[in-house]
Amino acid sequence: DFQIEGMSIRDSLLDYVTEEIIIKNSYHIYKNKDFVSFVNFARPESLYDGYQVSYKNKDKKYIIYSLEGIKLFKDNINDCEVLRKQIVNELKYLFSNPSVEENIGEISDGDPSGKSKVNISRFYLNKDLNREDIQISCYDWAEGFKFEDGSLAVDKLTVSIVTQEFLEFLKNEYN
């Protein structure tokens, strides 16, 4: 099982934090309200600055469908790229003969101006409907870009694992 912060896909978020913390740190960030995102800061000894989990709205078990470790790189996209490539090489070694897709310089869906870019490496772990995909990305946000909530975007590395169901949800969300 691939883990981030000790968590895996299809675990219950309740195994790691209390329901009170989940509710306090959960947000509806998608237009379609089928999924909710929980965002939390990582422990000081963690490799990441924080993590984000997506679970189904109204699911009282808080089953994890998407899990993402986040490392911030304020105005330092070069160091982000070095770490992304290192993680990709480690994963290629870890998984036997993985199917990997590279998308370099892709326009980020999160920035409607088209000025923000993302470099993505996707690992397809199996081909069935229950598949899980791992994605390692460096987001190079356009200078001064702000999210809808007004917060300033910071360049970041993300390491995520997502279920096929969540991937389909995202495909519908952004298309």
Image: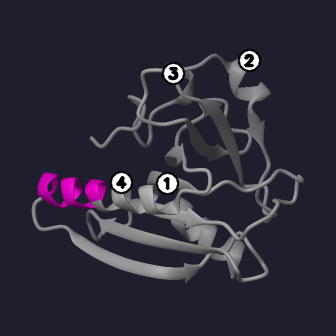
3 vs 57, left or right, is left
Q: According to the image, label 4 marks what residue? A: 83
The mark nearer the N terminus, 3 or 4, is 3
The amino acid marked with disc number 1 is Leu
Q: Of label 1 and label 3, which has the lower sequence position?
A: 3
Q: Amino acid at mark 2?
A: Glu
| Mark 2 or 1, nearer chain start | 2
Residue displayed at 72% across by 55% down: 34
Which residue does the image show at 52% across and 41% down from the upper left?
64
Q: CA distance from mark 3 to mark 2?
A: 18 Å
**Dot 1 alpha-carbon crowd within 10 angstroms: few under 14, some 14 to 19, many 20 or more:** many
Does the residue at mark 4 contact the one at mark 1 (Cβ under 8 Å)?
yes
- Pointer 2: what residue? 20
Residue underneath mark 3 = 43
Is residue 89 inside the magenta stretch?
Answer: yes
Amino acid carrying mark 4 in the image: Leu
The earlier-in-sequence mark between 4 and 1 is 4
Residue 49 inside the magenta-drawn segment: no
Q: Which corner quadrant of the image does residue 23 belong to? A: top right
Amino acid under label 3?
Answer: Arg
Decide: few, some or many residues near mark 4? Use Cα within 10 Å; few <14, some 14-19, many ≥20: some
Report the span colored magenta.
Answer: 86-95
| Location of residue 5 by image quarter | top left
